[in-house]
Each structure stands twice: as structure tokens, then as C-alpha cells.
Image (cartoon, helix red, strand yellow):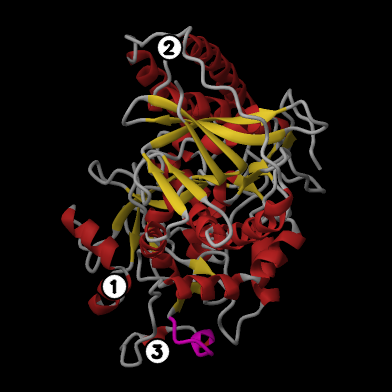
Amino acid sequence: MTTVEQFDVVVIGSGAAGLTLALTLAKHANVAVISKSQLSEGSTYYAQGGIAAVLDAADSVDAHCADTLKAGAGLCHEDTVRYTVERSRTAIDWLVEQGVAFTREQDNSNDKKNNNANSQAHTDYHLTQEGGHSSRRIIHAADATGKVVSETLVNRLRDHPAIKTFEHHVAIDIIVHRDSPTPVCSGVYVLDCENDQVLTFQARFVVLATGGASKAYLYTSNPDGASGDGIAMAWRAGCRVTNMEFNQFHPTCLYHPQAKSFLITEAVRGEGGKLLLPNGERFMPRFDQRAELAPRDIVARAIDHEMKRLGIDCVYLDISHRSTNFITTHFPNIHSRCLNLGINMCRDPIPVVPAAHYTCGGVAVDQQGATDITNLYAIGETSFTGLHGANRMASNSLLECIVYAQSAAASIIQSLETTEWQPNPSHWDETQVTDSDEDVVIAHNWDELRRFMWDYVGIVRTSKRLERAQHRAQLLRNEIAEYYSNYRVSNDLIELRNLTLVSSLIIESALSRKESRGLHYTLDFPDPLQFAHDTILYPPNYRASR
């Protein structure tokens, strides 16, 4: 008989958004946190740069908002931008209260004189600058901010008696009751990977915090779990998705056969790193007056252009003109990783290439993170709040995670007393399926999907490439649907099913945008339209709850 777990709130995902929400709710509800691997194994853990926040007296909410709106290429929702930025200091204060040890200024540092004058303010935290920002406002923990945030929040969560964690569990689908006037979420089916058993989680609220879908691409900075699970589950449940065509490619991923998705933080460029061609020539000033500090879409396209023009495998990022002490103090993890691969960044330039990094679109939500399904929320990279527009500005993502997790938590707390339990959900039915002896099909389809997404739906697109990708994605979806109907689910099958669906949504969104804007650049429509608009897709079973 299928096991039924019952909680007030089930949080799917254990990155910054999911952990923040769980900890905020823990005083008011019993909470389950579902993690497909270890609690810390998510995109948050690998985030190097930091968190954008208005902490400097010389900075302002207006300036941070203006920078975000400019980077977003006309598609940011201004009310969302202001809502998020106004809460940035509170978000950082909360993280500090949890024990996050951000890097502080060192009064005796020989390099402090190199800091922008804006850093002399009412804070003793070291602030750095990244692409698109007009001043130093990135608070960080050396070059491993995500790791420090993740480990701190995980430790707090493990000690909390009101939170139960389920590691190595993969969410399959949201349970939705459709008998009421509007669809209502009442739980989620989850695969216990260690025991190969599907569990039914009944909940008054379910929160999707599963991250993005950058594993749709052959080259990515993301960990293996970034397979768009929350977006796919929300779509199947009946939620709209918005702006899925805007996939951010981080300009500088370490290019080395043994590196596997190792990111070189934007802060290296913020601290003076220069992008060079193999002959040592600097090229970014030819593409943008902000040079290396231009927004990520511009830098990634410039690198892609130079690589194709010259037929080279990579470009180089050089910060060797800074002191050894500065480099090893500010970028200890990057320095160590590069050194292990035979690259001394104190002396040599680092080989880099663009890689899929962030999903700017996602599940449509309101300012409390609520979706189109009653009692179903989405936060973090899974969601579309309107903050990032057509191009996410560096280090705004972790800020969004904290701000919207707290906003969603406040909404849930307010609704707890008045939200009734839905009828017991149906158990997972495995009576008509068998064990698969053809898992090679999953591996083959996974590889094919990621290759044609990279080739046809990458940094530079054309309508013909997108149409080819759309045709191939539909063939894969048909094949996977048949496979899913006949065989027991597995982690790989669930991820492939989700990633293929989300890839189709990315392609459909890209085909519908007849312009180039931000992260979506097409040779067939190289100029932006006069008026910017969001791309909103409606699932076949859409029925709005609000």
C-alpha cells in the first residue's frame, strides 16, 4: 500500500528559496522539505558571486532599480523590481541573523585603496561590483557565497523539530482537485529513490522551489538536478509560464576537460579582469562602452561572436595584474580549482566559454509567489516574478530567492488557519506498468535533447533552427510519453520527461518573439520592437484561481 505523508506545507527544493521559506514557516506549521539529492546539492551551493543589496550609504534603491531595469531590456516589471530592492537590506539582515558569515573589509588590506569610493559607507562588509551594476553593492562570502549560504541554512534546518527533510526524493507531479470552482492543490507524488517507492504527500500548501532548467543545454554551469522539474509540474497542473525564451548564458565558465561546469564568477571582471583573445588582444570595448562590465547577454554574445569568427575553442579572462594576495584572498576557491588543473590565475589568463546558467522565465506568480492553482506557490528560479525581464542582472537571483520566500511564507502563514484539508488524494497506481529493460533509450534521448538545444536554441538563434528544434522536441515528447506510460518511473525518466517539456516551452516562446531583446537574439529579427511584451503560454487545462 502506498505510504501517505501529511504536512501543512511541502517545500519541493532545498536551495536558498526553499530553505528560507521552510525556516520562516517552521514556527507556524509542520513542514516537509523534499530534496532530489543531498540538501545542499543545488544551484545555490555553486553560486560564487554574491547577493545584490542596497547596503552602501552612497548607493540607493533608485539606483539599484534603474540598473536592474536597464539590464532587463524593457521587460522588467517595475513594481516587482522596487518591491524586491526595497527589501534587500532586510533580506541580508535575516541571513546574517541565521549565521551567514559574509566577507568583511580588512582595514590593513593593501588592496582596499583600489575599492570604489562608494564602498566607504555604513557597513563593514566588503562590497564588490558586477556587470550591469553602477556601484559596489554585491555582498559576498569570498568567492563561495552560495556554499556559505546553503551550508548555514541547511544546518539551521536540520536542527529544527518542525521541519522534516526527505533527501534523495524526486517530485513527480502535483495533486490537483478540480471539482471546486477553481483548481486546488492538495499534495504531490514523490519518488523515494533509495527504496524505489512512490509516496503520496498530502499538504495544505505545496511550494515549488526546484530551480531552473539549464540542463536542457549541452554546456551549463548548473548542477545535474537543474532539469526544470517545478516548471514542468506546474504546467501539467494547469499554470501559465512566462518568458521562457530568455535563457541566460554566463559568459565565463572554465574551459577545461576536467572542469565540469565550473563557473568563474563575474566578480573577477568586477575586480578588473579583462577578456582576451588568444593573441592577448582585448575585445570587449569593441562591443560595449562598459566593456567587461556590460550585462551578461552582451558579454556572452561578444564571446560567442569572437569564437565563431576566429574558429577558436575559448577566450581568456586575465586578472594577473592584481596582486597575488588580492587574488588568493578574494577568489580562493577559483584560484585553488584552477591551480589543480595547472592554471595559475595569479600569472596566467583563465580559458573561458559561455554556458547556460539561468532560466529568467518560469511559472507565473503574484507578489506572494502564488500560482494559478490555489495553495500552490512557486519561488526562486522556478518562478517568473518580473524581476529579471529579458536579462537577469548579476546577483539579483539570490536576492529574489530570499525576498519572495519570505513573501510567500507570510502569505501562507496568513492563510493557514482558514485553509482546509482537501479530500484524501488518490494513491499512485503502478498496476499497469513494468520494470524497464531499455534504459539506454533515456540516455540517448537525454543526449539528443541537450545537443539540439545547444545547436538550435542557444545564444544566437534563427527561425529555421527553432523550427527544427521544435520538431525534434515533439518527437522526443511522444516517445517519452509512451515510455512513461508503460514503465515504472525512475529519477532519470522523471528528469528527462520534465526537461523535454520545458525545452518545448522554451522553443515555443522563442518562436513567438519576432524581435531580438536581451537574452533572445535571432538573426531573422535582429532589432527590438518598439513596445516590449511578455510571452505568456497557457496550458490546455488552464483555469485561473485568481
The answer for how far apart the CA atoms under marks 3 and 1 are is 15 Å
Nearer to us in this view, 373 or 444: 373
Question: Where is residue 384 shown, x and y percent of the image?
Answer: 65, 47
What is the quadrant of the C terminus in the image? top right
Nearer to us in this view, 188 or 130: 188
In primary-sequence order, the first of circles 3 and 1 is 3
Q: Is residue 472 above or below residue 231?
A: above
User: Would you name the residue on which mark 2 appears?
Assistant: 487
What is the quadrant of the N terminus in the image? top left
Query: Which one is closest to the eye, mark 2 or mark 1?
Result: 2
Question: Where is residue 165 shown, x and y percent of the image?
Answer: 41, 47
Residue beneath the point at 60% across and 27% down = 425
Is 142 on the left-hand or right-hand side of 257? right
Helix, strand or loop under label 2: loop
User: Would you name the residue on which mark 3 appears?
Assistant: 113
Question: Where is residue 239 shown, x and y percent of the image?
Answer: 70, 35
User: Would you name the residue on which mark 1 appears?
Assistant: 327
Q: Is residue 483 above or below residue 256?
A: above
Provide the major secondary structure of the magenta segment: loop
- Is there CB contact under 8 Å for labels 3 and 1? no
Helix, strand or loop under label 1: helix
Image quadrant of residue 134?
bottom right
- Is there CB contact under 8 Å for labels 2 and 1? no
Q: Amino acid at mark 2?
A: Tyr
The answer for how far apart the CA atoms under marks 2 and 1 are is 52 Å
Q: Is residue 391 above or below residue 534?
A: below
Q: Amino acid at mark 1?
A: Ile
Is 518 on the left-hand or right-hand side of 51? right
Is 125 on the left-hand or right-hand side of 314? right
